[in-house]
Image (cartoon, helix red, strand yellow):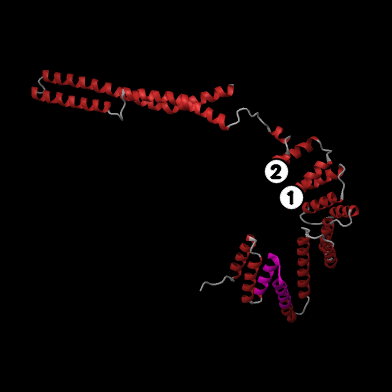
């Protein structure tokens, strides 16, 4: 009940604040009318005194009285002006004030009663955290899980749910702690070990550390075919300089991939990067006279493969840059057109192709 009293007082104060200046303006206008009459009488007295002292003649005194009367009439006309301040206008404003004071709060109550929720109880954050997580937004859901785990640190299942979330949010250090807590509290499966290994690698800036290798090896003991563990162990071979071993590991992973596996594209990109690095290293070992021919052959091979179908944005960029370096401007423009067609559903890729064409001076000139 107290809250409604406070609302009523606030509403009344707001209405009074709006109407008070109007009432003040009327009082000032009536005061001006009284001052005009007093001034008129003072002017008449002054005229009589001047006449008695023979400072002015009878004709001049009469003219002065007429002029003073005219001034009083003009003042009276202004007082009676509907736009000015009259007793009737004051009554109208008072009636408007009473109507506003009664109708505005009543209208507000009716609208709130029809569309508001006056009987709905308060629901603080603690109550919302206990409600159904499926009805909450992500931030509230995350806060709910973290609050639960703060009170129940031995809940391995809760840590197992939270750890991948931290990983997707780009919080690898928090993910390491969450995966470790899940494993420590009974969730010691292959996927948890592989997730911990990935978090350890990301926390180390992408380096497959000795600690991460041990974690990934433990994952493979629990599930020899775990794709995440195999992927990062293949990257470890690549970082060690064992390109052939990395290629073999990636190709084996592709061979065992189930249809539609989401991680297949990442494996193929790693293979292409290794192939490119290997080819560049091989070309660098050739005599200077043979290097240009080898580069051209590599570029032509890439062009034929992309022309046959597919290709990522990175591959198309590499082809376009290579053709431009070789002086094959027409082929580079054709590659840009083909890439636009192949990547037409990727707006970000189209923007990047436009930027690349401008950078290399390959934009078509207007006729």
Category of crowding for the residue at label 2, using alpha-carbon neighbours closer than 10 angstroms: few (below 14), some (14–19), many (at least 20)? few
Q: Is 125 placed left or right of 48 in the picture?
A: right
Horizontal placement of 228 versus 12: left or right? right
Q: At which x and y percent is residue 125?
A: 69, 34
Residue stretch in magenta: 296-323
Task: Place residue 62 in its image quadrant.
Answer: top left
The front one of 41 and 24 is 24
Disc 2 element:
helix
Task: State yes or no: residue 300 in magenta.
Answer: yes
Residue nearest the observer in this picture, 41 or 134: 134
What residue is shown with label 1?
A: 168
Quadrant of the image occupied by residue 143: top right
Residue 295, horizontal then vertical, whole percent? 72, 76
Residue ID for mark 2: 138
Label 1: element kind: helix
- Which quadrant is the N terminus positioned in? top right
């Amino acid at each position: 009940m107290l809250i409604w009293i406070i609302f009523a007082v606030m509403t009344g104060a707001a209405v009074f604040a709006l109407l008070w200046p109007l009432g003040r303006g009327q009082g000032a206008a009536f005061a001006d009318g009284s001052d005009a009459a007093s001034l008129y009488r003072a002017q008449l007295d002054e005229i009589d005194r001047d006449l008695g002292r023979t400072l002015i003649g009878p004709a001049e005194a009469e003219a002065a009285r007429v002029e003073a009367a005219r001034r009083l009439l003009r003042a009276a006309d202004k007082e009676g002006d509907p736009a000015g301040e009259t007793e009737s206008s004051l009554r109208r404003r008072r009636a408007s004030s009473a109507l506003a004071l009664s109708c505005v709060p009543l209208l507000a109550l009716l609208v709130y009663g029809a569309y508001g929720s006056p009987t709905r109880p308060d629901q603080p954050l603690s109550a919302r955290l206990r409600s159904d997580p499926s009805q909450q937004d992500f931030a509230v859901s995350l806060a709910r899980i973290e609050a639960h785990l703060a009170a129940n640190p031995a809940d391995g299942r809760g840590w197992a749910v939270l750890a991948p979330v931290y990983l997707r949010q780009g919080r690898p250090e928090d993910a390491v702690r969450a995966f470790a807590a899940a494993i420590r509290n009974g969730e010691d499966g292959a996927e948890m070990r592989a997730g911990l290994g990935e978090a350890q690698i990301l926390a180390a800036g992408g380096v497959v550390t000795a600690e991460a290798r041990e974690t990934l090896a433990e994952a493979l003991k629990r599930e020899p075919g775990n794709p995440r563990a195999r992927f990062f162990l293949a990257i470890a071979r690549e970082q060690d300089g064992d390109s052939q071993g990395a290629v073999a590991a990636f190709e084996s992973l592709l061979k065992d991939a189930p249809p539609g596996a989401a991680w297949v594209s990442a494996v193929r990109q790693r293979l292409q990067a290794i192939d490119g690095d290997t080819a560049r290293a091989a070309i660098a070992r050739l005599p200077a006279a043979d290097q240009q021919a080898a580069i051209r052959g590599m570029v032509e091979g890439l062009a034929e493969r992309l022309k046959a179908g597919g290709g990522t944005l990175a591959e198309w960029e590499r082809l376009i840059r290579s053709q431009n370096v070789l002086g094959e401007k027409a082929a580079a423009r054709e590659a840009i057109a083909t890439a636009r067609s192949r990547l037409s559903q990727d707006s970000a890729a189209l923007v990047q192709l436009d930027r690349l064409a401008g950078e290399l001076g390959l934009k078509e000139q207007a006729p």
